[in-house]
Image (spheres, rainbow, N blue to C red):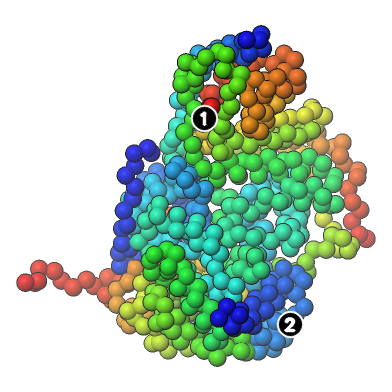
Amino acid sequence: MRCVRTLRSAMLRDFQRAFRRDLLGDGDGDLAAFTGMAPDQAARRMRIYRNNVQGSLAGVLASAFPVVERLVGKAFFRAAARAFVERHPPTVPQLSVYGADLPGFLAGFPPARTLPYLADVARLEWARIEAYFAGDAAPLDPAGLSSIDPADAAGLTFRLHPAVRLVASPFPVQRIWQANQPDHGTVSKVDLQAGVERVLVFRPAMTVLAHVLSAGDFALVQGIAAGATLGSAAAAAIEAEPGFSLQQALADHFSRAIFTDAA
Amino acid sequence: MDGDPGLTAAPIPAEAGIGLRHPHVAAFLAGRPAIGWIEVHSENYLMPVGPRGGGPRLKQLEAIRRDYPLSCHGVGLSLGSAEGLDDAHLTRLRALFDRVQPGLVSEHLAWSVTGGVYLNDLLPLPYTDEALGVVCRNVDRAQEAFARQVLVENPSSYIGFAGSTIAEWQFLAEVSRRTGCGILLDVNNIHVSAHNHGFDPEPYLDAIPPEAVGEIHIAGHFVASLDGETVLIDDHGASVDPAVWRLFRSALARLGRRPVLVEWDTNIPALPVLLAEADKAQAILDALCPYPAVGHVA
Amino acid sequence: MTAKTLSVAAALAGAISVAGMALSLPAYADNEKCYGVAKAGENDCANEAGSHSCAGQSTVDYDGGEWQLVPAGSCEEMGGSLEPFEGVNPTPPA
């Protein structure tokens, strides 16, 4: 039975594969034969579909990466998106997850090589998208930890809120992002030589927020994200930043509601 | 939000509704515009699920849903895919429906997925026996996964196929007959396709079994001139064309009173403009298909 | 108990005592109305119309010499500080 069904759908499947090849750029033009229209009319009508698919997906990418679009200009973005769509079409019919591969694509995209920070800005924008669409979780109430035996504190592990993301870059990506917001009234200078910037992206409730962390604080959250105990994450933080204050960092993170659980 | 008892299903009334799109969500959160019901695209609200799963967008929809009957209109299930439906997508959709309790669930007589790639358009099918079998299997599968009836919408299209052996209206009626699915009759799509393929829209309406139609769509379209050929593009980017209003009246005369939805997806106007278009549909509905007078029931 | 575990315990205790109140900041309030509605990642069912003048453009082949665009950059917005990276733009084909 199964074999028979597969055979019955074979022609439709081949047609759909051919249609897809035509839409995404490497079509051999054999669709005209399917349509029964004159070749020039069939080609004209097929362009409508090609334009819909490529244009709508470019629009989806532009809405997810508005700062990247602003940095490169609309024409460049549109053309880059087109190249991206052909190489990385969506695999899931849910466009809120489409674009995860764009930062990596931009990193290896020859025409964008004059903007070495571009891929990292894209990573920050994607982290914000992921944070926005992440699930909800109740924050950890730090008061619940006050009864913990001091001898057990270093062995604690924390679970991060599902929206937490970390982005580190050799460029000041958060400042670039900030300077390119539509409501950013005054022109601000961004010094590209300012050095490494480490960003915590989080969403305590309905709003995505971002905060630049110190080297030690970033190492702390990175360690916690990887499942390390508070003691070893703190040790990594102090190694990254000798003057690191664990108390200050923890107090900040409790108030940002980035933890949901401790064990 | 803790302790929310959850939503219970509210049926879609036979009144005018609007498609709720991103630019108008804030207005619906800030106030409660007067409209009989709303429809959203299901795929825009598929979020991580779980006890507190959701995120802002789904929370906002839930808040609005408390005050309006909601229809979930899918655009990504790809009922025409030869390779069948995606289990994971069916599961995500079911989780959404369980959460927001839509009064109607609908999809399209079209395809958008092949070889694991989603093409983000409602692509045309050759209307053959093979395609009929594929669509019926997929509709059965969806109705089983959702444990409810699905309405299937007639598409707009720009190309037809030499191999098609069944007229679109016969194909749609047969899918409904075989699977028990309902029909979402998009009057603008009939007008657009009738122009682009050169058929008469009235026999199309005649072929649709009235009892299967659970909803009507109306929208604007774009008249494009491509190399001298006039092609209607289904962009949902303008007010409803006079010819589509006429076809809408024809449809109501055959079907009787039905829920009617105004879709506006590109060049989205200020909310009052969209609501005025819905008012226009409502007035036609009330004039052509008034509710029977009450008070004489024994 | 080592000095290190003691200092972790002390830092944790200190953090617990000063944290908490910020959880009631407006940005953290669980209120669907206070968030600007995000438009990213929306599935749509409409066709592209306004851009049909460019329908059927040949696809971009940046490896094959058709690429003619260079990023616009945003020197003005960023105070001109992106200038160090100018001068290495790919040469547009003649």
- Residue shown at 29%/77% (left/top)? B256
Taking the image as shown, residue B94 lies to the left or right of residue A22, namely: left
Q: How crowded is mark 1: few (under 14 residues within 10 Å), some or many (20 or more)?
A: some
Taking the image as shown, residue B197 lies to the left or right of residue C56, namely: left
Identity of the amino acid at label 1? Asp
Q: What is the residue that sits farthest to the left in this orientation? A: B298
Mark with earlier residue (1, 2): 2
Question: What residue is shown with label 1?
Answer: A261
- Residue shown at 22%/71% (left/top)? B291
- Residue shown at 48%/88% (left/top)? B200
Chain of the residue under the numbered disc 2 shown in the image: A
**Residue A37, relative to residue B120: is it above or below?**
below
User: Quarter holding the C terminus of chain B?
Assistant: bottom left
Identity of the amino acid at label 2? Asp
Residue C41 rendering spot, x and y as whole percentages: 58, 53
Please tell me in which quadrant of the rendered image residue B267 appears. bottom right
- Residue shown at 61%/59% (left/top)? A92
Q: Can residue B160 be seen in this view?
A: yes
Please tell me in which quadrant of the rendered image residue B128 appears. bottom right
Q: Is residue A175 visible?
A: no
Q: Nearer the viewer, mark 1 or mark 2?
A: 1
Q: Which of A131 and C89 is in front in this view?
A: A131
Q: Nearer the viewer, residue B50 or B250?
A: B50
**Where residue A30 is drawn, which disc sits there?**
2
Q: How crowded is mark 2: few (under 14 residues within 10 Å), some or many (20 or more)?
A: few
**Residue A119, relative to residue C13: is it above or below?**
below
Please tell me in which quadrant of the rendered image residue A254 appears. top right
Give how far apart the Cα atoms at labels 1 and 2 are: 58 Å
Chain of the residue under the numbered disc 1 shown in the image: A
Numbered disc 2: secondary structure: loop
Q: What is the residue that sits farthest to the right in this orientation? A: C94
